[in-house]
Each structure stands twice: as C-alpha cells, then as structure tokens.
Image (cartoon, grey):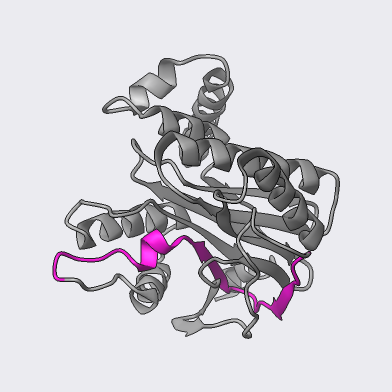
Amino acid sequence: MDADMRALVSLVAELVVVNDAYSDVFSRLRRRKTLSLAAEIQWELLPPLTFGTERVVITGGLEPAYEIGGDTFDYAVNGSSVDLLVLDSVGHGLPAAVLASVAVGAYRHARRNMLDLPDIAAEIDEAIAGQFGASQFATAVLARLDLDTGRLRWINAGHPDPLILRGASLVHPPHCSPSRPLGLQSSKPVCCETRLEPGDRLLLYTDGITEARSPEGEFFGEERLADFIATASAAGDPAPETVRRLMRSVLTHQADQLQDDASIVVLEWLTGEEQQLQLQL
C-alpha cells in the first residue's frame, strides 16, 4: 500500500508541475490574495523552492510572499557542482524587482557559459551598472560547492557572511573581506574558500532574517537562526518544513510586521553514505 500511495503521489505531483507551466489554475488556487506586481516578477524568477538527492538538499524561503520585491535566490546542480546565489536589491517594490531580474538573468547567462565565480560576479556587476547607473546596486553571495570534495568557494558582495551549521554548532567560515556590492565594483572580486564536512548545512540569507527586530527592539540574530536550524535537524524535520517554520518564526518575532524582505537558502551536503549508515544502525 505504501508503494502504491507513493506512486500515486509522485504521479499527481508530476501532473501538477507539468500543467503549472502552461496554466494559471494552480497559481490561483495557491493564492489567498493578490500578489503585488513586484512579487509576481520575483516568484517567476525562482527555481524550485526545494531540490534533493542523496548528495545534496537545497531549500529556499522568502517573505513577505505577497509583497516581496528586492530579495531573490537561484541555484543550479550540474554534475558534481552546485552553484548558489542569494541577492538583495537596493530599494523595494517594482524597481527592486526589475533590478533583481536583470541580476539573475546575468547570473544565469554567465553560469551557463561555465564562467568562474569572479567572472560571473563581474558580469552581474556590469549588467547592473550598465542598466541602472551608480545609484542602484545589489548585495549578494555567490557560492560554488564541489559535491565530491566539499570544497566551498564563495564571493561576498557587501552581503551577510555565509554561516555553516555543523551538528548543533555554528561555524563561521574563515574571514574573507567582502567586495563592493554588485553594480558598484571597481575590480574583479576575490574568492573565499573553505571545506564542508559531511552533514554540514550551509546558510545563505539576507539581512531581513538576522536583523528582523521585535517590537522590543531585539534582533532575530545569527545565534537564534543557527539554533532554530539545529533544533529542527535534530528533531528530524525535513528541510522544506524547517525553512517554512523558520520564516514563520521570523514573522512572529516581528509581530507579523516585516521591516524588510527576508530570504534564506539552506544547503545540506551529504556524501551518500549517511543513508547506508542509518540502515546499519
């Protein structure tokens, strides 16, 4: 029965995904109210919110869902290489969404041309500067993970630093000075580098997460973010549910009144041996 049910669920999911590409029916059913134009653009930019294999799990979340304008993320898994982007455009609403669209388009164009991270960042920078001028920019983290070795390289363009959660411990990557935001760079940025350990969770996020402020003035903060992910992982919560509950927690922390867009991407690196170990146990 379990196998039959899984087959049915898989078939229904495939039908929904395929039909969603050329029909508005499912988009309408998912919505509880009308999206802003900026949010409409941003949600269409996004890759699937969750992707998972025996080697890597990637999950993203954004809030506020119906008004978001400046935050976005993207990723691609090509063989043993995973590319990630988390980006925060200056401003709000439609102008920020348009800037983010150009930035993501430039990112995908450069990534699909198999450029290295510094060259990808340079292309995004050139696209933003060429289209919007010196007053417009975006902060971002661009990252690339080798699934075979755990080698992580990233570029920080004026953005919050990545965080690594190792078990229940928060690990700060080696210090690496950030470059200027994209659109304001004067030279090609330098890559930072570290290595993940099997089971590590990499957190890329915008400041709308950690700088979410309660009515009493308390920030959500890095430690609370790390504790939330660690607790959920220890409880066995799947990544999509963890991110969903995290975004709910961020909203609750601010009494449901976000001062800024908030987005996050959580990546868990696996070697493929974890499942075999669990079966042995």
Quarter of the image with the C terminus in it: bottom right
Q: Which residues are magenta?
A: 188-216
Query: 237 left or right of 55?
Result: left
Residue at x-position 76% and y-position 55%: 122
| Residue 32 in the image: above or below residue 221 | above
Q: Residue 255: image x %, image y %?
A: 16, 56
Q: Is residue 201 highlighted in magenta? A: yes
Query: 82 left or right of 210?
Result: right
Residue at x-position 58% and y-position 74%: 200
Q: Nearer the viewer, residue 273 or 233?
A: 233
| Residue 160 in the image: above or below residue 183 | below
Q: Nearer the viewer, residue 250 or 136?
A: 136
Q: Residue 75: image x %, image y %?
A: 64, 49
Query: 217 left or right of 279?
Result: left
Q: Residue 135: image x %, image y %?
A: 55, 50
Residue at x-position 65% and y-position 45%: 128
Q: Residue 9: image x %, image y %?
A: 48, 32
The image quarter in which residue 177 lies: bottom right
Q: Nearer the viewer, residue 66 or 102?
A: 102
- In the rendered image, the residue lying farthest to the left is 216
